[in-house]
Amino acid sequence: MIDLKQLRENPDRFRTGARLKRIDVDIDRALELDAQRRAAMTEQESLRAEQKKLEKELGPQMGRLSGQLKKAEGDERAKLEAELTELRAKPTALKTAIQAKEEVVAALTPELEALLLQIPLPPDADVPEGAGSEGNVELRTWSPSAPDAVPAGGSFQDARGFAPKTHLELVESLGLVDFERGVKLAGTRSYVLTGLGMRLHQAVLQYAMNFMADRHGFQPMSVPVLVREEAMIGTGFFPAGRDQAYLVSEQARGAGQDMYLTGTGEVGLMGLHQDEILDEASLPLKYVTVSTCFRREAGAAGRDTAGLYRIHQFDKVEQVVICKADEAESRAWHQKMLGYVEELLQSLELPYRLLQCCTGDLGPKNADMVDIECWMPGRGELDPSGRPRGDYGETHSASRLYDFQCRRLNMRYRESGSGSKGGTVFCHSLNNTVAASPRLLIPLLEIHQQPDGSVRIPDPLRPWMGGIDRIPASR
RNA sequence: GGUGCGGUGGCCGAGCGGUUGAAGGCACACGACUUGAAAUCGUGCAGGCUCGCAAGAGUCUCGGGGGUUCGAAUCCCUCCCGCACCGCCA
């Protein structure tokens, strides 16, 4: 949610922001509704002030009269009744007028609120302008050295001296995934991790989780993946991403509330403190969770249909930081959170690049977003011999949201220190993937495959794999 | 699934038709006392919205919505949520 006051003061900033993000929203309509609504509210409030004044002046008198009325008889009674009716006339008239204004406000509010939820956070000035992913800018790359040296963006064959198998071929030959039975159970884009495939998946998650907790002081949390709509709206995934979320339709069966399956642990972690006023001294909050993520992948029909790349259900270790409302601090955390992932990927010896997303590739809720893409030799267009040339695939995404998300979540802290009036301030929030698996298994398998068809397991994962150092080429 | 109870400020908790935006306590802030601290005492301390340069003024909010009333945290209806016990069960 953007700040309505800022919108009124500087609507052009938001018009430009929406245009840069290629998001279509009627800001003028929002301003118009807001103006109408405020006018009605002002009138209503002054009417109400008058009503309250009358109540105080006349109320006791009316109470006294109706008391007398009970005991009175005949002429006396008629006289009292007339007096009472007269006294009541004014407040009653006011009440009608107030209700009329109330109706005006009530009629304007839903449309205004719906529009406000759609207005995106403007991108930061230093985010490059662009229409879509083709406008993204590479910031830097990193490549591992021996034994499994593969240059980011380069040729696996040239570096390693043999043609790489794709992850699809590898999971098949090594017996790591059963796609047929996955599809039988749950339809397209489903899979079953088997044996060492499951162990590798768990190893990645365990390693990543412990990495954040032990090395970087993030607090591990388990959070719900089945949540109420407020959590989806509050975290900014709705209304824009409604199509991407699975709905558990409880109301259709007469139960209390519909629920949604979350597409990321971010929802649970950020929803934790919804409607809370946090203790400033407790900031920044640094949380890490591992959770199953559900995505409908609506609109992606036909894309990445084979393999483990684009699937409806996966597991993800996610990091979230909730800090004070300070741009410099937010920016610093963004860099740190990217640094943790670089450290993790380097320890796994995976080539990657950092991509500065351009304005057109940002979501509604972020001011800035940096993706990390791992090099996947088995992806991309085919060369003349029919083998893939390799391509980058997105494995991580680090967002800086400032107070956009916390404003929606109504998540604040009380500001202390000089210059503050002890008021409440919306927190800032950031999030970044730590590791999403099975997608991360793609580069892991493809980069660490050996000429004999086996796959070397990078050192940090071995403790989580029962100590083995490779997935043996089977049979 | 059944029965019962309940949802009030940062937290706990009183209030059950007007004087209550709300007693009391805790927490927090400032001040006094103290060599310092603790303890104690004093003072302050809900959030949102509107108007205003500001000081400030107005208004809304006691789970949500609706109703009764001149007037509702308090009465009625309804929905949501939570807790307890029983049943069932991983």
Image (cartoon, coloured by chain):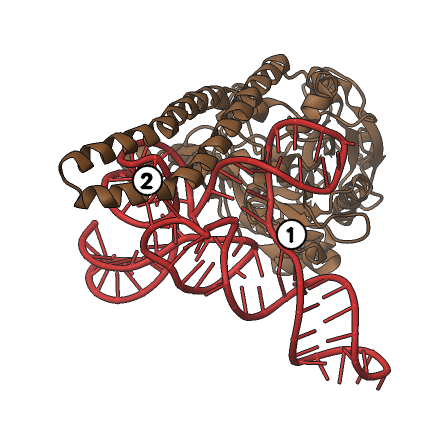
- Subunit ID for the residue under disc 2: A
Q: Residue at x 81, y 22 (%)?
A: A128
Q: Residue furthest left?
A: A74
Q: Quadrant of residue B58?
A: top right
* Among numbered discs 2 and 1, the one appearing first in the sequence: 2
**Residue A11, how many percent across, how many down?**
71, 19
**Other residues around mark 2 within 10 Å, as few (<14) / some (14–19) / many (≥20):** some
- Position of the N terminus of chain A, as image quadrant, is top right
From the image, tell me which residue sits under label 1: A287
Q: List x then y, in percent, for residue A435.
A: 65, 44
Residue A361 on image: x %, y %: 70, 22
Mark 1 crowdedness (10 Å alpha carbons): few <14, some 14-19, many ≥20: many
Camera-near label (2 vs 1) is 2
Res. A305 in view: no
Quadrant of the image occupied by residue A379? top right
Inspect this view and state whether residue A86 appears.
yes
**Residue at (83, 39) in percent of width and height:** A143
Chain for disc number 1 = A
Quadrant in which the C terminus of chain A is drawn: top right
| Residue A350 as seen in the image, left or right of residue A3 | right
Residue closer to the observer: A175 or A127 = A127
Look at the image and give the colour of chain B: red
> Which structural element holds mark 2?
helix
Please name the color used to draw chain A. brown
- The residue that appears at 39% across and 38% down in the rendered structure is A58
Residue sitting nearer the eye, A413 or A18: A413
Q: Nearer the viewer, residue A474 or A144?
A: A144
Of residues A235 and B48, the one drawn nearer to the viewer in this rendering: B48
Give the secondary structure at mark 1. Answer: strand
- What residue is pinned by disc 2? A62
Check disc 2 and give the amino acid type.
Met
- Left or right side of A158 for A446: left
